[in-house]
């Protein structure tokens, strides 16, 4: 795993744990809602993660994009499907999405290059079922 990806993963995990350690039910419930949203239902996890990736591209949130690229990869999204997802985000979000698309493709390349895939450690949605 690249240093940048490892840093991102460690920071997200550490801060999620720190935030959830606070006695704030609103924050905990929101995190739990997020967790529940990405579980399989009428839509499978793979589809939901691709939807999350499109939304993240359109909203131009690099942390969210990185998270959903990793989750999509873990869910079995193939490169051709990634680029269809990227195209939807680009069409919906416009040219301002391009810098974020570059970073998303860079991360995908890293994940595909045989770099250690430790996506579970960066999961926002993992283990946050506290209401």
Image (tube, grey):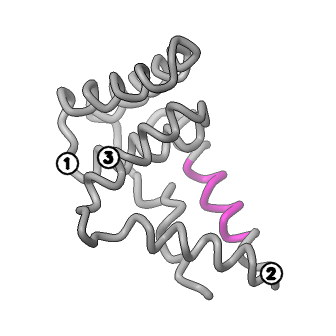
Q: Where does the image place residue 85, in percent across and percent down from the top left?
A: 31, 32
The total of numbered circles placed on residues is: 3
Q: Which residue is mark 1?
A: 76
Is residue 113 in view from this perspective?
no
The part of the chain drawn in magenta is: 9-18
Q: Nearer the viewer, residue 66 or 45?
A: 45
Circle 1 SS class: loop
Q: Where does the image place residue 39, in percent across and percent down from the top left?
A: 35, 70
Q: Nearer the viewer, residue 118 or 125?
A: 125
Q: Which residue is mark 2?
A: 24
Question: Label 3 to label 1, Cα distance in Å?
Answer: 6 Å
Q: Which residue is mark 3?
A: 72
Q: Nearer the viewer, residue 131 or 106?
A: 131
Q: Earlier in the sequence, mark 3 or mark 2?
A: 2
96 vs 3: above or below: above
Is residue 109 in view from this perspective?
yes
């Amino acid at each position: 795993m690249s240093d940048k990806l490892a840093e991102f993963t460690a920071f997200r995990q550490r801060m999620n744990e720190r935030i959830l350690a606070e006695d704030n039910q609103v924050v905990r419930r929101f995190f739990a809602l997020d967790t529940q949203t990405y579980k399989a239902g009428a839509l499978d996890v793979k589809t939901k993660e691709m939807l999350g990736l499109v939304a993240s591209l359109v909203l131009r949130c690099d942390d969210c994009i990185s998270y959903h690229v990793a989750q999509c990869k873990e869910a079995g999204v193939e490169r051709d499907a990634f680029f269809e997802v990227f195209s939807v985000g680009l069409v919906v979000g416009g040219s301002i999405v391009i810098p974020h698309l570059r970073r998303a493709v860079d991360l995908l390349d890293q994940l595909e290059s045989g770099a250690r895939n430790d996506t579970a450690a960066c999961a926002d949605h993992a283990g946050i079922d506290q209401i």
